[in-house]
């Protein structure tokens, strides 16, 4: 149960009103039950837990799937918006749309989440902790997102202590078609997209261009701005270009290629002085990100032994410019992160129900600043056995060896069994895994902040973890009702954080994250669906005996969709994030309790005909004033509307 204290502080009234908004938007369940036919339960396939498409009922891992239909229905335009309701995740976005966005998964650090886009690792070697900035990714061409929670280094290698987020772009299929959309609304929002796609058994293609603009988002809390100093809104502009091609050269040989380029600019209010105060003039941050992967697929045994040979490359360039006393931008500071990766994976079906997955990888990464250029490499090999012993007992076990050029060899593994109870169809699941993460290049060598007396630490040790979870899932009424819970715990040694004097990084010793994820889902008719997810997380620095920052104990999300008529779809989302420990805007107060809040979003989508759709949404319905992180406002009440076309 979520405990709320002072109503004015904890947001009890908006929270109650949020639930009321959802309930009043939906017609009584009894009336819905009389319309429509019963749903047909389909066994959803997931890929990220094993690397091989597998029915979800056979997987022990906790994995959340977000489809393009859900993204379109809820009108989520950025990756942070699409991930906001996922259980076990806490998103922190500095400076509003386009600002640095971090994801904390099951209480682990933001750099303990490995992020893949079409198989390309996109964690940025140039950032201080090698984390991926989720704030730059648009959702226009995303087909599917899988959020895989728990230690996954046995299959994915370093940086997957908390889990993996795997993003897949849309593949062209069918006759040639052109799609486009345009929308406008609050905070200077003006977004457009256009795409061309098609494909057949031999060749497929998909090209897309997306533009996102929000040029008047208030982010700085008014009380932080000194009297007489202007309060500037943030402005963000993003152009994203994507392409995906596939060709079947012979019956046994095919090739695939994906490419993505993102060009974004953020104008934001920086700080100066100590204690710091928001500047009178805006700073500028430019992002240029390029991701590409080429792949050859060789299938010599009619699907029984599929080989993939791939080359991936990522280049992430960030430049920052601060204003001087006259408002003129100074010379930029540049940070470049680059990664090249070669890999082979083979999926071998030994016998029916027994699949062996093998892989080899070699990667190099480099980060380049005006002061220093450093690089590192890693070689990895893994093997995984996926077993279907009966139609009710399944196991997955993997083991991996990585050799880091600096820190030597590390072995990680994972085992995850599932048992389906006869009669009740209760799914019992468990997993145990280990993980490791080498210190980043920036953590070891960076001296980019000498003005703040902050330097890298070349003596850091790798972080290591052990994690387990155990849970159940229970379907009722032929799958129309589902509920379940998963208990988890991660023990991390040598966790890297800033040291006590905040002049460098240090291995703090040991940290523990533990909690529970619970859900309940109802599909009363194909026209009405509702799901609630609740996460309790306790993340502690066991050495200092205090909670880790920016890990709320409580998170609740409720999503609902309803089709009152064939052409109209309504959806509502409530996200409640509870109290947490944080620092103030400049961390002159290093620990303070930040209040929680409940945010409600509504969306409507009306399909005029097969080619033309009108849509609109309202975000932060009750205009909740909420800072996440402290010192940076979440955008208030906003309304956006637009049209979508297909030719």
Image: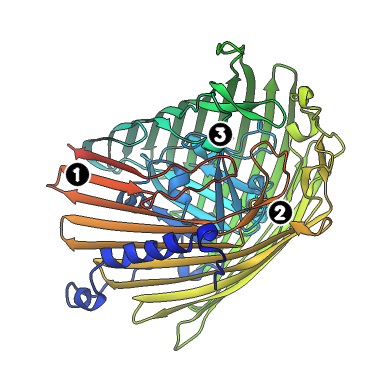
Q: Which residue is mark 1?
A: 614
Q: Nearer the viewer, mark 2 or mark 3?
A: 2
Residue 228 position, x and y percent, is 54, 24
Q: Mark 3 packing: few (<14 Cα in 10 Å), some, or many (20+)?
A: many
Disc 3 marks which residue? 312
- Rendering colour mode: rainbow
Q: Residue furthest front?
A: 227
Residue at 57% across / 13% down in the picture?
Answer: 329
Give the percent coordinates (x, y) of residue 195. 29, 33
Asked if residue 595 shows in the view, the reply is yes
Rounded to the nearest whole Å, what is the CA distance between mark 2 and mark 3?
34 Å
Q: Nearer the viewer, residue 65 or 223?
A: 223
At label 2, counting other C-alpha atoms closer than 10 Å, the crowd grade (few under 14, some 14-19, many 20 or more) is many
Query: In the drawing, does residue 392 fall left or right of residue 560?
Result: right
Q: Separation of disc 3 and disc 1 at Cα?
A: 38 Å
**Mark with earlier residue (1, 2):** 2
483 up-or-down from 343: above or below: below
In the shown orientation, is residue 54 left or right of residue 345?
left
Q: Quadrant of the C terminus?
A: top left
Q: Secondary structure at mark 3?
A: strand
Q: Earlier in the sequence, mark 3 or mark 1?
A: 3
Q: Earlier in the sequence, mark 2 or mark 3?
A: 3
Describe residue 445's horizontal placement relative to residue 70 as left or right: right
Q: Residue furthest right?
A: 459
Name the mark nearer the viewer: 3 or 1. Answer: 1
Above or below for 121 versus 69 = above
Q: Which residue is mark 2?
A: 548
């Amino acid at each position: 149960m979520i405990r709320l204290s002072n109503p004015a502080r904890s947001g009890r009234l908006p929270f109650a009103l949020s639930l009321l908004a959802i309930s009043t938007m939906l017609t009584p369940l009894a009336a819905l039950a009389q319309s429509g036919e019963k749903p047909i339960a389909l066994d959803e396939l997931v890929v990220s837990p094993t690397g091989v498409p597998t029915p979800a009922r056979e997987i022990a891992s906790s994995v959340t799937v977000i489809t393009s239909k859900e993204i379109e229905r809820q009108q989520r335009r950025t990756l942070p918006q699409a991930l906001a309701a996922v259980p076990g995740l806490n998103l922190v976005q500095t400076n509003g749309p386009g600002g640095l966005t971090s994801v904390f998964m099951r209480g682990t650090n933001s750099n303990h989440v490995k992020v893949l886009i079409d198989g390309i690792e996109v964690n940025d070697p140039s950032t201080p902790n090698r984390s991926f900035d989720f704030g730059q990714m648009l959702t226009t061409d995303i087909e599917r997102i899988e959020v895989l929670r728990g230690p996954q280094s046995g299959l994915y290698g370093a940086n997957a202590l908390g889990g993996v987020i795997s993003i897949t772009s849309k593949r062209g299929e069918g006759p040639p078609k052109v799609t486009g959309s345009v929308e406008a609304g609050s905070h200077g929002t003006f977004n457009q997209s256009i795409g061309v796609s098609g494909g057949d058994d031999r060749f497929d293609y998909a090209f897309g261009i997306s533009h996102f603009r929000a040029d008047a988002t208030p982010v700085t809390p008014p009380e932080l701005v000194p009297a007489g100093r202007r309060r500037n809104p943030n402005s963000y502009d993003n152009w994203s270009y994507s392409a995906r091609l596939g060709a079947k050269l012979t019956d046994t040989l095919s090739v695939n290629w994906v490419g993505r380029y993102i060009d974004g600019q953020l104008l934001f209010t920086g700080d100066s002085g100590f204690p710091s105060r928001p500047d009178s003039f805006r700073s500028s941050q430019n992002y240029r990100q390029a991701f590409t992967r080429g792949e050859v697929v060789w299938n010599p045994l009619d699907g029984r032994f599929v080989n993939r040979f791939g080359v991936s490359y990522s280049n992430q360039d960030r430049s920052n410019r601060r204003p001087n006393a006259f408002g003129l931008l100074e010379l930029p500071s540049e940070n470049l992160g680059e990664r090249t990766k070669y890999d082979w994976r083979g999926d071998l079906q030994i016998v029916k129900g027994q699949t062996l997955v093998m892989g080899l990888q070699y990667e190099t990464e480099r980060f380049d600043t005006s002061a220093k250029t450093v690089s590192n490499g890693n070689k990895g090999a893994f093997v995984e056995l996926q077993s279907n012993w009966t139609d009710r007992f399944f196991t997955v076990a993997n083991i991996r060896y990585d050799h880091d050029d600096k820190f030597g060899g590390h072995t990680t593994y994972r085992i995850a069994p599932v048992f389906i109870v006869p009669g009740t169809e209760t799914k019992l699941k468990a997993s145990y895994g280990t993980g490791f993460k080498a210190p980043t290049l920036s953590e070891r060598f960076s001296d980019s902040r000498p003005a703040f007396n902050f330097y890298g630490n070349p003596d850091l040790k790798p972080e290591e973890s052990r994690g387990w979870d155990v849970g159940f899932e229970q379907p009722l009424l032929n799958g129309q009702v589902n509920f379940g819970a998963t208990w988890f715990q991660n023990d991390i040694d040598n966790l890297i954080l800033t040291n006590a004097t905040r002049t460098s990084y240090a291995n703090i010793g040991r940290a523990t994250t533990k909690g529970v994820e619970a859900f309940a889902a109802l599909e009363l008719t194909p026209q009405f669906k509702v799901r609630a997810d609740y996460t309790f997380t306790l993340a502690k620095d066991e050495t200092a005996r205090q909670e880790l920052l920016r890990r709320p104990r409580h998170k609740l999300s409720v999503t609902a969709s309803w089709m009152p008529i064939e052409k109209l779809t309504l959806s509502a989302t409530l996200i409640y994030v509870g109290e947490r420990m944080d620092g103030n805007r400049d961390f002159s107060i290093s620990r303070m309790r930040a209040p929680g809040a409940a945010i409600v979003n509504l969306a409507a989508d009306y399909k005029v005909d097969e080619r033309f759709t009108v849509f609109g949404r309202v975000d932060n319905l009750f205009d909740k004033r909420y800072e996440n992180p402290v010192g940076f406002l979440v955008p208030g009440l906003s309304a956006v509307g637009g049209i979508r076309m297909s030719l």
